[in-house]
Amino acid sequence: MEGTEVGGYALHFFFALAYTAAVSSAMSPAVSFSGPQRIPYPGGCVTEPAPYALDYLLKWSADVTVRGEIHPNKQVFAFVRELLADPAAHGLTLADAEAARDLFVELAGQALEAEGGDREWLRREFRR
């Protein structure tokens, strides 16, 4: 009987690990990238920080991972727009592409707000 309990425990443990792995892979995003570093605002009286930050973020580059494939040094905004335009070309669903857009708005939005901007400006850029 003792062997059965140990075997039952081992089987239960195995299924718990399998479930955990399935949930974690299902929860990991199809598209990922790190947020921008501090925006290198040059200062001066000609350029306002918030519009400068918006322009910078629309051109900001980073390594973007799509379904485990790294796309090095991509302009993130332009690449996410490309994903939204044709998700299937990258093996994504529309929901995956929209999640990438939301991640961009969240991460770039934080940097934009730190410079006095509004993340709604980023959402507006995606609607253009």
Image (cartoon, grey):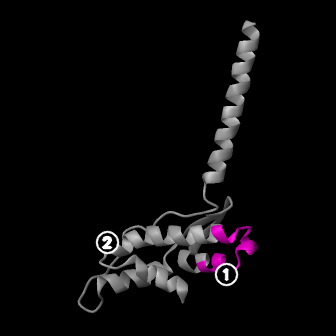
* Mark 1 neighbour class, 10 Å CA radius: few under 14, some 14 to 19, many 20 or more: few
Q: What residue lies at 54% left-to-right and 90% top-to-bottom?
A: 128
Q: What residue lies at 66% left-to-right and 42% top-to-bottom?
A: 21
Does residue 39 appear anywhere in the picture?
Answer: no
Q: Which mark is residue 85?
A: 1
In magenta, the rendered stretch is 81-95
Q: Position of residue 102 (x, y in %)?
A: 52, 70
Picture quadrant where residue 87 is located: bottom right
User: Which one is nearer the viewer's eye here, 37 or 92?
Assistant: 92
Q: Amino acid at mark 1?
A: Ala
The extreme top residue here reads 1
Q: Main secondary structure of the magenta part?
A: helix
The residue indicated by pointer 2 is 114
Q: What residue lies at 50% left-to-right and 71% top-to-bottom?
A: 104
Q: Amino acid at mark 2?
A: Ala
Q: Which mark is residue 99?
A: none
